[in-house]
Image (spheres, coloured by chain):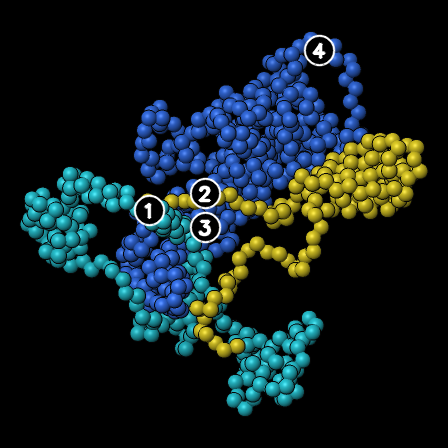
Chain colours: A yellow, B blue, C cyan
Amino acid sequence: MTIKAIRAVATGQNGVGSFILQCKKLDFHYCDWAGSSKGMNGFIKSLLPKFATANPQVEFAISPRPGKHPVIIGHYINGRTKPICVRNLSPYEILKKAELLRDANGEQLKRHNRAVTSNKPSVRGIWSPYHGKGMVV
Amino acid sequence: MKRAPLQRWGGQLLQARSRAAMAAPAARQPFAASLHRHASSAAATHSPADDIPAESLRSPLPSPRPNRAAESAKLAALHARLSLSNKIPLETLARALVVPSADVNASFNNSNLAFLGSTFINYHVLEYLAVKWPRLPMTILYEALRAYAGKESLHQIARRWGVEAAAAPGEEVDPGLLQWKPQESGLQTRWGYVRAEAVHFDRFEPRRGISSRVVMDDEFGDTLQAPKTGPEAFKFYQDEAYGSFVQAVVGSIYTHCGREATRDFVQSHILSRQIDLSSMFQFQLPTRELAMLCAREGFSSPIARLESETGRLSRTPVFVVGIYSGSEKLGEGSGPSLNIARWKASMNALKAWYMYSPGNKVRVPSDMFEEDAKPWKAPHIDIGEII
Amino acid sequence: MEFRALARPAVRLLNTSPATTLPLVAVRGHKTTARTKRSLKIAPHDSFLPNRQIAFPAADSIIYNPPSSEASPEHTPFIFLPSNDARRAAFTRLRHIANSPAAPKKVSELPKEVEYKRRTPSYHLGAEDIKEMKRLRNEDPFKWTSYALAEKFQCSSVFVRMAAPAPAEYLKALKDKAERREGRWGHIRTKAREDRKRRTDLLYRGEM
């Protein structure tokens, strides 16, 4: 029994094995009076029921915010939130914004230069000057 | 694993639940078998105006009533997010979120479901590990099991499912929130074989050999944990609370959907995670152990050979040493001195021995439960680690 | 060739013929990313390309180009594969092909051995010798240290310590002496010793 074990925790990646939608809640705020909420009110009446039925993984909350511009706030599993102001937008434009929030993962936007970022080590290992046949390239 | 007793067991859990609900005070409502879900809280209309006077007379319950589960948008969203079958009612999921430290009544908390689920998680993970890496030493096997199915790992899984905890458990809390307190519940939720000498653990530390841990102690080869106090208590109970939710979800999947669904769920959510086994080894005498391995297996004794080197007389030399048995290379390592390189090479050779795997796609014993499964072919069984 | 060498300095670097010398006139540098990338673009090494000696409708060929990197413990050496493993049969077949790169080298072709102190048991001591060893050790442990006994009986000092352990008072005296010596160390030497211990620990955990 000369070998001891070092404690570790397995790491998971979303989408490997199972996929969990990262948006867990969408808040819709509207105003009954202001003109900038006209599109939002139409969206809540006409498009939201269908959108909510199609996305049962997301919790929807609708609440008035009198005297303010309409806003959609996405809450994500990583604890971040993303608000989008949808003043003066038409219902279909608001639907686009809601879909954008639903599909986001909550991370801050960053540039990805590679198509795939892998956390697997390279199959061929890290190049070392002390190995191989020392061939002239 | 026999099928019939376990199914009966799952059934008993639910029966006990409904019996207890009937025997409980009148304020407790029996299980509502409603499968109706609301995806939005705006759509949920709740007007229990008539039962308010009766409720104000009694003391509040420790956890939300089961019949409020159908009103919770959070719970419905969680149900859909996990892609659970419609056979699993929201009430069961709500019960899985009640940890014994919040509600000690076993008919309303997740202790039974969590125990059932933990047996399935541990079984599926362990059979996978034993077939995938047949030569792992017992200590590493236990730690690998813990890396997949331990409390910390299950806590992370629950966090990635988007489970939120209530600030404090209570009757008025949304049933879609995890109800727990950082304290001992008083209910027996940790299981294992307690050794006779356990009462003296405070005075001396008796020897616990690894082979005795196979029979005694808990599923990870640890002694049963005493109730915690102090700064580490919060993390301990938090891990346990979130972990018990994952276990209870697996338990409820078994109860309502059966064995195949449970196996698929464990594979997709727990076994799909990754561990780096090669970083889990800690050696003591690698060169001696490798020599003993070669003697045991009948290989010629290991010899270190200098593959390449640079800067021998400089401040930062690098030596690459390979370990050979006859003309077969067992492993290699590089280091700033010949001895360090030789030790690293021995450790790599030992890791290569212990981490032998028959392949990435291995058949596990539970695959044989499938209908028209191919005949079982015995996996590689190793004679054991080097002692 | 001349224009090519001017346009692609990387090619010039590879060209080892002594005829080409560095031009004395200043060469224009690469002012843009595109030009830099283009000048650094060189064809892959032959070992990455399929064999062109075979006539055109060539069968599938295997490019054998082992990585120039440290072997990972994920790869099980041939000798460690159990007899029922499919890889063992495949490797055995490969090794019997003439001039196969997978064939093991002869022992004479392998790199030279590292010299280090290793166990060379001769098993020449009997029960009488060990009895004598114990007697000497108990008689005067300060004279008959494990090294002195090892020299006398032609065995290792580790064996002496196992076969004829020293009396407790001698061990205590040794320990006290070591403690007195270590008590005189300054903080630099103490820290260096601690660091060495920590490094060894890291090494055995595979973190160094």
Q: CA distance from mark 4 to mark 3?
A: 58 Å
State the residue in front, B190 or C4: C4
Label 1: element kind: loop
- Given the image, what chain letter belongs to the residue carrying mark 4? B
* Left or right: C123, with B56 as reference point: left
Q: Nearer the viewer, mark 3 or mark 1?
A: 1
Which amino acid type corresponds to the residue marked 4 in the rendered image? Ser
Which residue corresponds to mark 2? A7
Determine the residue positioned at 70% across, 32% down.
Answer: B74
**Can residue B345 be spotted in the picture?**
no
Q: Position of residue B163 (x, y in %)?
A: 64, 34
The reply to the same-chain question for discs 1 and 4 is: no
Q: CA distance from mark 3 to mark 1?
A: 36 Å
Determine the residue positioned at 59% across, 79% down.
Answer: C10
Q: Earlier in the sequence, mark 4 or mark 3?
A: 4
Q: Position of residue A110 (x, y in %)?
A: 69, 53
Which residue corresponds to mark 1? C186
Which residue corresponds to mark 3? B279
Q: Nearer the viewer, mark 2 or mark 4?
A: 2
Which amino acid type corresponds to the residue marked 3 in the rendered image? Ser
State the residue in front, B41 or C45: C45
Q: Nearer the viewer, mark 4 or mark 3?
A: 3
Q: Is residue C109 above or below residue C23?
A: above
Which amino acid type corresponds to the residue marked 2 in the rendered image? Arg
- Given the image, what chain letter belongs to the residue carrying mark 2? A
Which amino acid type corresponds to the residue marked 1 in the rendered image? Gly
State the residue in front, C145 or B358: C145
The reply to the same-chain question for discs 2 and 1 is: no
**Can residue A93 be spotted in the picture?**
yes
The reply to the same-chain question for discs 4 and 3 is: yes
Quadrant in the rendering for residue B370: top right
